[in-house]
Structures are given as C-alpha cells and as structure tokens.
Image (cartoon, helix red, strand yellow):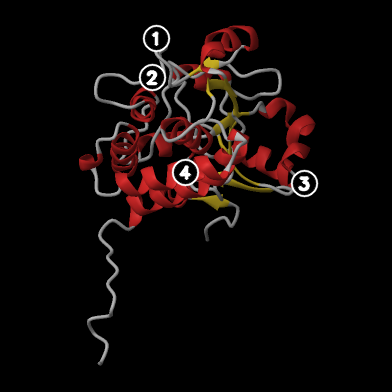
Amino acid sequence: MPNPDTITVQQLSRLIGMPEAPIIIDVRTDEDFDRDPRRLPASLRGDHRTVASWAQAHAGRSSVVVCQRGMKLSQGVAAWIRLNGGRAEVLEGGFEAWASAKDAPLVLPDHLPPRNAEGRTVWVTRARPKIDRIACPWLIRRFIDPGAAFLFVAPSDVSAVAERFGATPFDIEGVFWSHRGPLCTFEVMIEEFGLRSEALLRLGLIVRGADTASLDLAPEAAGLLAASLGLSRMFRDDLAQLDAAMPLYDAFFRWARDATAETHNWPNPGARA
C-alpha cells in the first residue's frame, strides 16, 4: 500500500512552476550534494541535523522533502515538519528518481546568485518594467527562488546598487543576465539555468516577440505586449505591477504547457439555430 505522505516524480513535476507549488526542501547530505549540485526547481537546502530548529518555519505550509533516495533523511525531516504543524510529503525515490526521470528539470548551479542573510537571492534592474523585466522575475520566483527580492531603480544606478547591495543585475547592457544574440534575457535565463522545456521555450518565444517588437515570432506576442503595456499604465509602483502580472505569466505558462491545441469558437458550431 503506498505511503500517504509521499508524492511521485510525475505528481510533483505537474506542480513545478505553478503558484500553488509546494516548497521543495533538499536535505541531501553534503557529500551527496557535492557529487551532484544540481537542484530541483525552486528548492531550498535544509540540514537534517538541525531540523528541530527550523521545522517551525514551515508550519501551515505545504512542502516536499527530498533526500538522495527518498528514505530515512526525508522521512525524518518530513515527520518533524508535520510535528510542527506543516504539511510535508516525501519525494518517492528522492533526488535519484527525479534526476533519472524524463522531462524533470534540474537547475544548473553554475550561475546561481548567492543568498543574503535572510536566505534570499537579490536582483536589481531598471525601474518601470514592461515585459522582460517582469518575465524574468516570474521565472526566478517560480523556478529558482520563490522568495527572491527585486530592486527596481533608476537605469543609471543599476550597477552601483548591484555593487553596494550585493544584488545581481539583469536586463541591462554589459551584464551576464541580458539579451544575447537573438535571445531576450528571459530566454538566456532558461538556457543558463538548464530549464529548457517545451512549455518554457514556447513562452520564451512569446516574451521575445513582445519585448523586441517582433510580433511575427508568435501569434500570442501581440497579446502579451498589449497586456504588459496596459499593466505598466495601471500601476505606478513597480512591485505592485510585478505582483499583478504574476498571474498573467502563470496563465501563459499553463497554456504553453497544457492548452496549445485547444481552441474556442463562437458561436458554437454544434448549437442549433
């Protein structure tokens, strides 16, 4: 009989990138992690030896615990989290099962920014975002760091703020996270983080089309451009605009993953006159 407190690779993969995705806690030993430092999308590192001191932080939240094979470490950590009022499941088969599964993405560690004292990555870009500077934060929060902090500042101050505040600059000229050849910054992040999937690549083409006025790249690019420009005029606060735009990108991602073949016709051709 299956353990009711486990989740399969297939079940978890369907939640990755969704706003309701659980927190993924990687409790592999340092030795196992050093052998393969790739990470499940949006996962956090947790030390099983000190779980009694941090389990309370997950009270009232849903989480999935991942160790190397889905056995004693993840079972024990998940039990501690449940003891402290959290909802915790164990990934069946652990990291090894995820890594061997087809179409189960793993984030490459090469260019992951360091986390600050609060455990968050910090990013900085130009104020008054439109498309790429909204799409990138969506990708980061859904696939890299759910708690990522974004600083929107005057264009002339991005580099100085990045240096003074330990932030990673993006979508400005002369930095690593920027347009590269035909690719927009969003697409560069997909490539560098190892997040290539059919859905994200399709979404990337839409973002590039809207961001570079190349609307012929994808029929949906014009719609994203219109919605983005509308949002930029609805909000004076860049962070409020980002919060409002997150569901827009959630919807585009869900369409790109699950609904590209679906059409909607009106009037219904099967209806009687």
Q: Name the residue under label 2.
A: 178
Q: Distance between the residues labelled 2 and 1?
A: 8 Å
- Give the mark nearest the N terminus, 2 or 4: 4
Viewer-side label of 2, 4? 2
Horizontal relation, residue 157 to residue 214: left or right: right
**Residue 174: which numbered mark, if any?**
1
Which of disc 3 and disc 2 is earlier in sequence? 3
Mark sitting on residue 83? 3
Q: Earlier in the sequence, mark 4 or mark 3?
A: 4
The answer to whether 70 is drawn above or below residue 174 in the figure is: below
Quick one: label 1, few (<14), some, or many (20+) residues within 10 Å? few
Task: Say which amino acid is labelled 2.
Answer: Ser
**Separation of residues labelled 4 and 1 (CA atoms):** 29 Å
- Residue position for label 4: 17
**Numbered disc 4: secondary structure:** loop
2 and 1 marks in contact (CB < 8 Å): yes
The answer to whether residue 221 of the structure is visible from this angle is yes
